[in-house]
Image (spheres, helix red, strand yellow):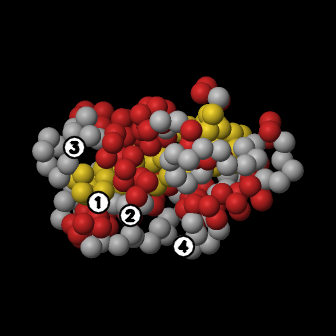
Amino acid sequence: MTFLSSQQLVLASSNLGKIKEIQAILAKQVIVPQSAFNVTDADETGSTFVENAIIKARNAALHCNLSSIADDSGLVVDALNGAPGVTSARYAGVGASDHDNVLKLLDELKGVPDEQRTARFICVMVFMEHANDPFPVIAQGVWEGRILHRPVGANGFGYDPVFWVPEHNCTSAELSADVKNSLSHRGQALRSLTNLIKAR
């Protein structure tokens, strides 16, 4: 799966879990995280996944002078009216750990029965040829599931240990990397993005 043959792409993320997943899915593409250029994360001031992904992609392209890809993703829980949503990575506060975020989520869902714990991961992926690209390529992936009452599994990151995957009868954190990437919101978005770029 190749975007621009051997040309480098800068990945607008400092999240080690995301970097690992994206590099695994785009195995043949030369991906360089923005941290290699000493670029820090852009402020996610948007109110939607799309806005934040564009902000991050533009920031990376501007400071690295390379084409960039960025994603903004998060967990949307129906019983919480869509929370944590775009604040998923900082649900328990700025600088919160994955563990802190999961604990807050489980606390917010205390007493909510299984049938009302439906949720989905959403990922919006953006490709920009340069910082002033007027037509960024945008793709989306959605992964449906349910939130458990306690964490299970040691793989993945973020909310994976409490995200139940019905078709595999386990959590996202119990899936192998290959299986997760074939199902996940991020895998879906990247494959869709690749097809859109090829067709451009």
Of label 2 and label 4, which has the lower sequence position? 2
| Residue that label 2 marks | 14
Image point (50%, 65%), residue name: 46
Mark 1 neighbour density, 10 Å: few (under 14) some (14–19) many (20 or more): many
Image point (27%, 73%), residue name: 38
Q: Quadrant of residue 58?
A: bottom left
Q: Secondary structure at mark 3?
A: loop
Residue 18 position, x and y percent, is 42, 53
| Residue that label 1 marks | 33
Residue 119 appears left or right of 46: right
Residue 185 position, x and y percent, is 49, 40
Return the mark for residue 95.
4
Image point (52%, 36%), residue name: 175
21 vs 92: above or below: above
Residue occupying the far left of the picture: 6
Return the mark for residue 29.
3
Q: CA distance from mark 2 to mark 4?
A: 13 Å
Q: CA distance from mark 1 to mark 3?
A: 12 Å
* Residue type, label 1: Pro
Of label 3 and label 2, which has the lower sequence position? 2
Q: Secondary structure at mark 1?
A: strand
* Residue 114 seen in the current view: yes
Residue 121 position, x and y percent, is 57, 44
Of label 1 and label 2, which has the lower sequence position? 2
Image point (56%, 38%), residue name: 174
